[in-house]
Amino acid sequence: MTLTGAGLSTDSGVPDYRGPNAPARLPMTYGEFVSGPTARQRYWARSHIGWSRMTGAVPNPGHRALAALEARGRIDLLITQNVDGLHEAAGSNALALHGRIAEVVCLACRTISSRSSLHERLQRLNPRYAEQHVDVASRPDGDVDLDDTSAFVVPDCDACGGVLKPHVVFFGENVPTPRVQRCYDAVEALVDRHGALLVAGSSLTVMSGLRFVKRAAKLGVPVVIVNRGATRGDDLATYKLDAGCSEFLGELAGSELRGA
C-alpha cells in the first residue's frame, strides 16, 4: 500500500506547500471560498491561470515507477493526497483522497462537470487574461500569486445557476467518509498480508494522510517514509529515508524488474 503527497509531483514542475525550499503560504479554505463572490473571484482568477500551466505537467519517473509496481501487483492500493491527476496519467488506478482538480462541482445541485469545459467558459468571459499575467509565480494546487482579481468574471452553474467549486477537498472540509473507510480497510488488510505502508513525498502535516500512518503503526504494520525533510510521521516510521521520490522509486521499480 502506498500513500503519496505533493513531494512526488515536484519533479513534474508542480510546487508544494511544505517542502524544504517552499515559501510560507496557505491555500484558500472552504470557509473563505463560500464567504462571498469576492473570495471566489480571487480563487478562480488565480486558478484559471494556474490551470493553463498545470495541464502542461507530465508524470515524472516517480509516477511511472509506482504505475509499474502497481501493474506487477506490488501495490494493492495507491492513495494520493495530490489533486493533479499525474498518477492516473502515468497509468495508475489511484484513489484521490482529496479529489481531482480536473473536475468541478456545483454546490447547489451537485452536478459534476469537467474543468476543461469551465476553462473554455472562463476564457470566453475573460479573453487573454492568462496572457496578461504570464509573469506571476505558480503556487501549489494549480493557482498563482496574483493580488488584483477584481476584473475577473466568474460564471455560475450551467444547470441551476449555483456556485461552482473545484471538486477537491479544501482545507476546512472533510474527506468523504466512504473514501476514508476504504483506506482504513486497506491498512487493516496489510496485517494478514504481511504488507507494509510506503509513504512517498508527504510531510504528513494534515491528518487526512497521517491517520493512516497512525493506524498502520498501531496495528504493527511496517511504515516506510521517503521524503525530503521531516514529517509528522517520523516517530511512527519503521524506516525513514530523506531522499527524492523519483530516485528512490525508480530504483525500487528497477529492482523489482531485475528480480523478475
Image (spheres, rainbow, N blue to C red):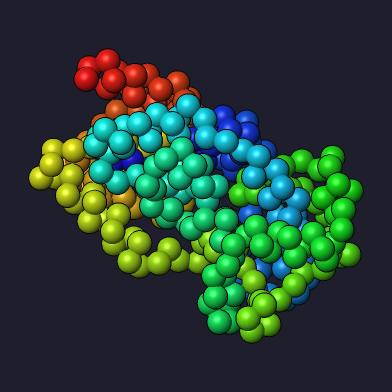
Instruction: Judge whether 247 appears above or below 88 on screen.
Output: above
Asked if residue 112 lies left or right of residue 198, the reply is: right
The reply, left or right, for residue 85 in relation to residue 183 is right
Whether residue 78 is visible: yes
Q: Is residue 158 above or below residue 75?
A: below
Residue 179 vs residue 213, the one in the foreground: 179
Q: Is residue 194 above or below residue 117?
A: above
Residue in the foreground of this view, choosing between 46 and 19 = 46
Task: Name the one closer to the observer, 117 or 254.
Answer: 117
How many labels sit on residues? 0
Quadrant showing the C terminus: top left
**Residue at the extreme left of the image, as rendered:** 192
The quarter of the picture where residue 31 lies is: bottom right
Instruction: Please give the name of the residue rendered at 83% of the width and 66% of the height, measured from the top-left corner.
Output: 125
Please state if 101 lies on the left or on the right of 24 as rendered.
left
Measured as percent of width and height from the top left, residue 247 is found at 45, 21
- As drawn, the residue found furthest toward the bottom would be 160
Q: Residue 173: image x %, image y %?
A: 50, 66
Identify the image quadrant of residue 109: bottom right
Q: Is residue 90 above or below residue 214?
A: above
Who's the residue at 68% across and 82% down the image? 161
Q: Quadrant of the N terminus?
A: top left
The x, y position of residue 85, in whole percent, is 51, 47
- Point 29% across, 28% down: residue: 239
Residue 96 left/right relative to 194: right
Write the residue at 72% across / 68% down.
Answer: 40
Residue 232 visible in the displayed image: no
Position of residue 5 measured from the top left corner of the image (x, y, whole percent): 47, 42
